Image (cartoon, rainbow, N blue to C red):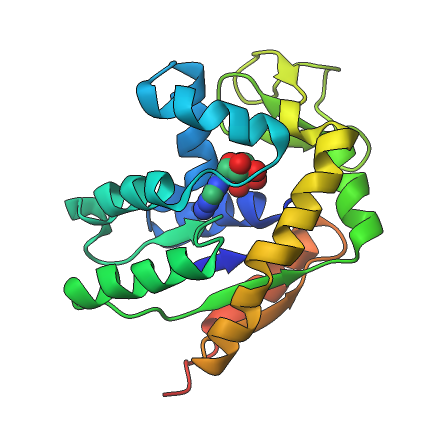
Amino acid sequence: MIFLGAPGVGKGTQAEFVASRFHVPKISTGDLLREGVAKQTPLGLKAKGYMDRGDLVPDEVVIGLVQEKLSSSECSLGFLLDGFPRTVAQADKLSELLADQGLALDHVVHFVLPREEIVRRLSGRRSCSKCPAVYHIESIPPKQNGVCDQCGADLVQRSDDRPETVQSRLTVYEQQTAPLIDYYKRKDLLFELDGSGPVEAVQDRLLALLSKPRVE
Ligand code: AMP
């Protein structure tokens, strides 16, 4: 399964939910890269500049990350990709990797949301500095200001969620990632999901969509 859509559409939140509900591993290239940056690994050091500018990290770097994850035994029965692929070259490479492992994609879910709402969500997003929990200052506030409900750590604004970087991330999405919508439509794998409204409403629509049998 692939979750596709602009930054801020809610893919990560719903990916967290689906992964725990269906017990499938979630592979989020953004999370893996941020982990590398925090730990100052060679990969993190290479990726940091691109991420701070809102640019995509080079294909070979993220493909290497995904390749390593997909070949692990926990992914042998299925997985959910959040934020990958983001370019046609990544999508082509993914097809090759899946074919090598005898796997096929079931769903590519395209999260749809108007640009103004995306900007509102990104600028109010706060992430936990320790665990994967994500909040929004207005629509999903933590119980205590600036503190994670799950683990008590400080909430921070991702450096790439600042307004100046948000605009370039959206432009990068439109130019480099949006072509994947047609790419997967042509392969008859694309499912459109209305990403508007509260988290629970999107969750319900997503569950309904995933329960539809795939048309062969
Ligand atoms: P995300 O958390 O998915 O919004 O990703 C945060 C940042 O990580 C992006 O703005 C990119 O700089 C980088 N990134 C994540 N996934 C990819 C990918 N598949 N290809 C290239 N860069 C990526």
Relative placement, left or right, of 126 versus 68 is right
**127 up-or-down from 11: above or below:** above
Q: Position of residue 193 (x, y in %)?
A: 63, 66
Residue 9, visible in the rendered structure? no
Q: Position of residue 26 (x, y in %)?
A: 38, 45
- The front one of 213 and 89 is 89
Residue 18, visible in the rendered structure? yes
Q: How many marks?
A: 0
Picture quadrant where residue 133 is located = top right
Q: Position of residue 40 (x, y in %)?
A: 38, 14
**191 up-or-down from 28: above or below:** below
Picture quadrant where residue 204 is located = bottom right
The residue depicted at 49 percent of the width and 17 percent of the height is 130
- The front one of 64 and 77 is 64
The residue depicted at 49 percent of the width and 53 percent of the height is 86
Relative placement, left or right, of 59 versus 110 is left
The residue depicted at 25 percent of the width and 47 percent of the height is 67
Quadrant in which the N terminus appears: bottom left
Residue reaching furthest to the bottom: 216
Quadrant in which the C terminus appears: bottom left
**198 up-or-down from 41: above or below:** below
The residue depicted at 39 percent of the width and 32 percent of the height is 32
- The front one of 204 and 132 is 132
Q: Position of residue 195 (x, y in %)?
A: 69, 58
